[in-house]
Image: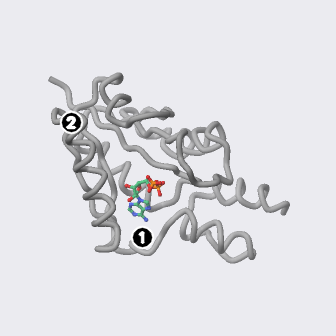
Amino acid sequence: MSSIAVCPGSFDPITYGHLDIIRRGAKVFDMVYVSVMNNSSKNPLFTVEERMNLIKEVTKDLPNVKVDEHSGLLVEYAKAVNANAIIRGLRAVSDFEYEMQITSMNRVLNDEIETFFIMTNSQYSFLSSSIVKEVSKYNGNISELVPPIVEMALNKKFNR
Ligand code: ADP
């Protein structure tokens, strides 16, 4: 049986932190679906299509990574793509409570799908899409935080 994992998130936009998790996941699982959540209550800066295109571009060297989108329940999406695992990244203890809640809920909904947590490289433990957007908005240097293509997309969004 091949191991298929879903790596869900808002990815608004993808950062080196996300990429670290995706790369680590791709080493362990036969196939990783990076799926942009289309049902987020957050007010996104990038459209789902823009977010998917950026992810595709920065993961194009990873043959076992597929970029997708989903709306509705994650476990239903996971089932539809035959995934038996969900990958989530952990940055700090502060992520833990929220992740535990979601994982427990997903387990109630479908006990067959296991959630795996990957701890990020410590250099990205402070990194989030929101921080990147905030810094970029005020023209701060984000070259260490996101791939160049994402930096360009942010500059465009902020009319630079
Ligand atoms: P969500 O809205 O689901 O939290 P995000 O795009 O913020 O979506 O995050 C998607 C996944 O990537 C989550 O598992 C999150 O913990 C993880 N993640 C985000 N930023 C980092 C980072 N800097 N290091 C490791 N994991 C991260």
Beta carbon of the mark 1 residue lies under 8 A of ligand 1:
yes
Q: Earlier in the sequence, mark 1 or mark 2?
A: 2
Question: Quick one: quadrant of the N terminus?
Answer: top left
Q: Is residue 14 left or right of residue 102?
A: right
Q: Nearer the viewer, residue 117 or 26?
A: 117
> Measured from the top left, where is residue 17 in percent x and y?
44, 62
Residue located 21% across and 36% down the image: 113
Q: Amino acid at mark 2?
A: Ile
Label 1 CA crowd tier, 10 Å (few <14, some 14–19, many 20+): some
Residue at which label 1 appears: 124
* Residue shown at 52% from the left, 51% from the top: 11
Secondary structure beneath dot 1 equals helix
Q: Quadrant of residue 138?
A: bottom right
Residue for point 40% across, 33% down: 63
Judge depth for marks 1 and 2 and give the one in front. Answer: 2
Q: Which residue is mark 2?
A: 113
Circle 2 crowding by C-alpha within 10 Å: few under 14, some 14–19, many from 20? some
* In the image, residue 137 above or below residue 76: below
Q: In which quarter of the view is residue 107 placed?
A: top left
User: Could you tell me residue 23's position as x and y percent?
Assistant: 36, 49
Residue at 67%, 43% in the rendered image: 47
CA gap, disc 1 and disc 2? 27 Å
Q: Tell me which amino acid carries mark 1.
A: Tyr
Q: Quadrant of ligand 1?
A: bottom left
- Furthest residue in direction right, as rendered: 159
Residue 147, above or below 87: below
Image coordinates of residue 131 in percent, x first then y, are: 57, 71
Instruction: Assign a secondary structure to mark 2.
Output: loop
